[in-house]
Amino acid sequence: MSETSELLSAIERRPRRQLGRTDIRITPIGLGAWQFSEGKGGARGMWSTVLSPETDAIVQAALEGGMNWFDTAELYGYGRSERGLARALTRAGIANGQVVVATKWNPLFRSAGSIRNTIDRRLECLKPFGIELHQVHFPASFSSVEAEMDALADLIEAGKIRAAGVSNFSARQMRRAHSALVKRGFVLASNQVKYSVLDRHIETNGVLAAARELGIAIIAYSPLEMGLLTGKFHKDPKLLQTRPIGRRLRLGRLINKSRPLIEAMDRIAQAHDVSVSQVALNWLVNFHGETVVTIPGASQARHAVESAGAMDFALTAEEMLLIDRLSAGLNR
């Protein structure tokens, strides 16, 4: 069996979920590609620069772990992440159609017409891979939600993309987006939002409820809270000083607050012979049935291996409820 065949076989062995009410099927855990930005476009201060050889190794590890989808964006290095992802997939022997690729349109200082005008650039950066899911990165353009969805619907009809999604949209904005797409004969596939055991705001602000009601997938980003949910910073807080300043500021104040949860998750991890981060990811993609999927990033290949391994075991009902109870207290 060739190396590429082995990768495809690893992917085929993983369970798949429907992306919202589309015909796209994805593994519960995919790979987020913000870290491939080469330090540009918002990555500075959050991610260390990941060079091409490591990008290849990370994508290879994700594929070997059975991940079948990858999420990037125009803003991630202004095309650098898209190009790096496409190169890494190609070097792994993956062809268009064998994995699912999602990207996002940058709405800053633009109108909905830019969605149509920039799609060829997105496809060029991702060449030879097509765009299965195209998302509005956040609700900040000069146009209405309805105009943005009309532009995405035009791209679906033109065969440029397969499905439309949004990111960082409120429950009300989600409903407007979904309604606009339904009028065109399509559905809103997903809303990509921040969600983790330490940030459960979508459970109380209506986003999760709207997603379940309308059959929209929740794509959780920052599921490990920039590494905090690995537990390593709790064991050695000095490690924070080696991380980019954005992470230090964001995570420093959360270490003591989250310690009881991390300690409980550590005990659960030991019972399953897995890591704390794998427990956090497993809970996230299973606690709400199949509504939530997630895209942890990886700055080293071993991080992708570990994330993929979160699909290899099952938490008990009691363990799920314990994590729910402890983390809910942190989100009040």
Image (spheres, helix red, strand yellow):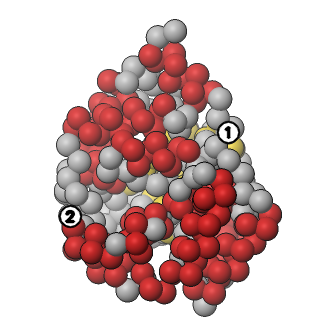
Q: Secondary structure at mark 2?
A: loop
Residue 169 is left or right of residue 141, and the answer is right
Residue lying at 37% horizontally and 86% vertically, measured from the top left: 253
**Residue 282 point in image, percent of width and height:** 63, 56
* Pick the front one: 19 or 105: 19
The kind of residue on which mark 2 rests is Arg
Residue 133 is left or right of residue 108, and the answer is right
In the drawing, what numbered circle is on residue 320?
none
User: Looking at the figure, which quarter contains the C terminus?
Assistant: bottom right
Q: Secondary structure at mark 1?
A: loop
**Residue labelled with disc 1:** 16
Residue lying at 46% horizontally and 18% vertically, measured from the top left: 4
Count of numbered labels shown in the rendering: 2
Q: Is residue 199 visible?
A: no
Residue occupying the far top of the picture: 1
The kind of residue on which mark 1 rests is Arg
Residue occupying the far right of the picture: 317
Q: Is residue 103 above or below residue 129?
A: below
**Residue 165 point in image, percent of width and height:** 54, 54
In the rendered structure, are the residues bearing label 1 and label 2 in contact, judged by CB atoms less than 8 Å apart?
Answer: no
Residue occupying the far bottom of the picture: 332
Q: Residues within 10 Å of mark 2 (few under 14, many from 20)?
A: some
Residue lying at 37% horizontally and 24% vertically, measured from the top left: 92
* Pick the front one: 150 or 78: 78
Q: Is residue 11 visible?
A: yes
**Residue labelled with disc 2:** 44
**Residue 65 point in image, percent of width and height:** 52, 36
Q: Residues within 10 Å of mark 1 (few under 14, many from 20)?
A: some
